[in-house]
Image (tube, grey):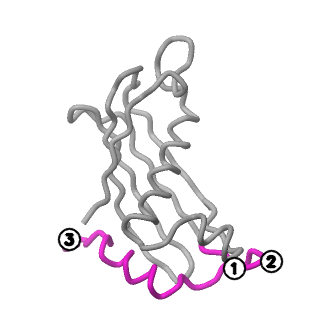
């Protein structure tokens, strides 16, 4: 299973040439991640970060930009869980526009607890929902 979200490229995403300024893709990836937590995992960043005092920071991100996107493009973000650890989750993002690949990105986010922000086990309810999106590996 995957989580999908369409984001239309608007003026604030673009540089003077009218194409997406690359840091804006990271904002979009974070937006998709936040929406995934709320819509698929049953919790929000408000609940985790504000109400509980915990956090889910990005520990690693690696992105390949395949083709530029421009003002007005409708970008389909597809999120897939590729690995689930005790306190981390590996995510893979594919971004397309009308079936044309625009970028791929792999990130690792970590669940950290309290003021010390030390890695901690994913809450069971969240981990259970993440398992539904875990990409099944084919035979080696």
Q: State yes or no: discs 1 and 3 in contact (Cβ < 8 Å).
A: no
Crowd band around label 3 with a 10 angstrom C-alpha radius: few (<14), some (14–19), many (20+): few
Secondary element type, mark 3: loop
Q: Residues within 10 Å of mark 1 (few under 14, many from 20)?
A: some
Mark nearer the viewer, 3 or 2: 2
Q: How many marks?
A: 3
* Disc ID at residue 138: 3
Task: Between label 1 and label 3, give the one nearer the viewer.
Answer: 1
Q: Position of residue 69 (x, y in %)?
A: 39, 25
Of the 4 image quadrants, the one containing the C terminus is bottom left
Query: Measured from the top left, where is residue 118 in percent x and y?
Result: 73, 78
Taking the spot 41% from the left edge, 20% from the top edge, the residue there is: 71
Distance from disc 1 to disc 3, alpha carbons, whole Å, reads 34 Å
Q: Are marks 3 and 2 in contact (CB under 8 Å)?
A: no
Query: Seen in the image, is 52 located left or right of residue 104?
Result: right
Which residue is denoted by mark 2 in the rendering?
116
Mark 1 highlights which residue? Answer: 113
Q: Earlier in the sequence, mark 1 or mark 3?
A: 1
Q: Which residues are magenta?
A: 111-140
Residue 113 counted in the magenta span: yes
125, above or below 82, in the image: below
Q: Looking at the picture, tell me which residue is in the foreground, 61 or 111.
A: 111
Image quadrant assignment for residue 117: bottom right
Asked if the residue at tag 2 contacts the one at tag 1, i.e. Cβ–Cβ closer than 8 Å, the answer is: yes
């Amino acid at each position: 299973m995957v989580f999908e979200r369409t984001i239309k490229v608007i003026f604030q995403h673009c540089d003077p040439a009218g194409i997406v300024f690359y840091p804006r893709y990271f904002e979009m990836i974070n937006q998709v991640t936040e929406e995934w937590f709320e819509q698929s995992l049953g919790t929000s960043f408000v609940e985790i970060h504000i109400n509980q005092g915990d956090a889910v920071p990005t520990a690693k991100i690696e992105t390949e930009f395949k083709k530029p996107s421009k003002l007005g493009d409708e970008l389909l973000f597809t999120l897939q869980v590729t690995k689930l650890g005790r306190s981390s989750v590996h995510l893979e993002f594919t971004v397309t526009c009308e079936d044309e690949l625009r970028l791929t990105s792999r990130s690792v986010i970590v669940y950290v607890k309290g003021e010390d922000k030390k890695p901690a086990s994913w809450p069971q309810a969240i981990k259970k929902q993440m398992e539904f999106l875990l990409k099944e590996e084919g035979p080696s």
